[in-house]
Amino acid sequence: MATEVVSRTDPEVARARQIVAEMFGGYPPGDFAVRFWDGSEWRSNPAVEPSFTFVLKHKGALRRMFWPPSPTAFTVAHIYDDFDIQGDMLAFCRFGRHLEALPTRMSMFEKARLAYRLFMQPQVEQRRVGRQPVELSGALHSRERDKQAISYHYDTSNEFFERFLGPTMVYTSGVWEDENDTLESAQYRKLDMMYTKLRLKPGERLLDIGCGWGTPLMHAAREYGVDALGVTLSSKQADLGNQRIRDAGLDGRCRVEVRDYRDLDQPGSFDKIVMMEVGEHFGPDEFPGYFRKCFELLRPGGVLLLQQITLFDYRVAPTVKAFGQQYIFPDGKLVHINWLVEQAERAGFDVRDVESIRENYPKTLTHWLGNLEANHDELVKLTDEATYRTFRLYLAGAKYGFISNLYGLYHLLAVKPDETGVSPVPPSRRDWFAPETRYRAEK
């Protein structure tokens, strides 16, 4: 039974409380509260301590959250401070999935009554300042439009990303062995795992597509003795990446270029190619061309390794998709692992290994989200409150997605057969995962 924690006589609060009880009251865990703009509270279950609290900032907050109905109204109202979320963001994301299914549990009469009540809530004009939804021009996945999409996300602020990614600035999932691992150690373990699978050797030429701020390139050059080239569409990433490479004294062995991988014209010139969580920007229609290009760039016997977020749930929530398209990764689209395997094989690759490492991502996201929340004031100074809230929602939602099996995370290893049709890699994983060789590579 829902309850009022503090009683007030304000009729607008009373009407808002009635809407809250109708919309929020059927959530079984009952582990949240709603605080109204006058300081009064409503709790779904008074016997349960709230994991999080909705803080409605003004009398028009509910209308801004739910009217007119749209996939992004709720998240946008939070981004621009119509309401706040205090407490456990993962618990909030669980509730959000429940709330999204609310219309399926209501009769037509109940929907009409709720719509009328929301429409009659006060209209409050609140300026939406700070980060704005993306505006792109040009044909979908044209070179210019892709550059705009990448710039929208990755050119936010190098300092902003460093604060929550940590000193490695690696924006992909780490690989964890136990709860005592640091974020930094998990990221380097991931790199060593991937480079061992690729069997990097001194003197080989490595291409990193979507190389971020340079740490994977530097690690490959320093620890494995390769000549590494990274390409990115983000100018800010490239500038900082090359500065970090120079500071490490590795500028003769690795570099970052602002270049679309589709414009690389070096057939057969790379021994190994790695791409870590960049294909999420492509969408299914771009993968056939991607695999053909990688096949062209690799020498016979060359190896390609992807770390790729995939989609498990074929019924992805419309709110998640709309929010991601407008505020996080415009034009991006997740695909299923079977699609990746099929397109790699169609391009001529011999797919040698597919490994799920999904359980590592919630741990990585826990650290990123913790860093973000711990540095709120500094991050807002670097950007703005709307950007902070956007990334907080994104990281928490991603964590929930991996925990709830909405998203997957895979390594896909594929080889370009040599002239005889042979794929020159060992026939088993034994050399990767045996205790004496795990996460090590020949130097």
Image (tube, helix red, strand yellow):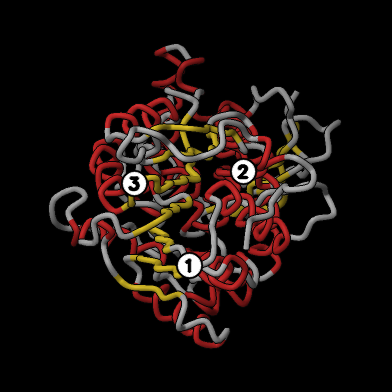
Gap between marks 2 and 3, in whole Å? 39 Å
Residue at 41 percent of width and 46 percent of height: 323
Which of the marked residues, 2 or 1, is nearer the chain's N terminus? 1
In the image, 369 versus 139, the foreground residue is: 139
Q: Residues within 10 Å of mark 1 (few under 14, many from 20)?
A: some
Residue at 48 percent of width and 52 percent of height: 276
Name the residue beneath numbered marker 1: 203
User: Whole-percent x and y of residue 79?
Assistant: 48, 56
In the image, 264 versus 68, the foreground residue is: 264
Name the residue beneath numbered marker 3: 300
Residue at 55 percent of width and 86 percent of height: 249
**In the rendered image, which quarter contains the C terminus?**
bottom right
Q: Which disc is residue 399 wearing?
A: 2
Gap between marks 3 and 1, in whole Å? 16 Å
Using the rendered view, name the quadrant where residue 283 is placed: top left
Q: Tell me the kind of residue under disc 2.
A: Lys
User: Whole-percent x and y of residue 39?
Assistant: 70, 54
Q: Residues within 10 Å of mark 2 (few under 14, many from 20)?
A: many
Using the rendered view, name the quadrant where residue 221 is placed: bottom right
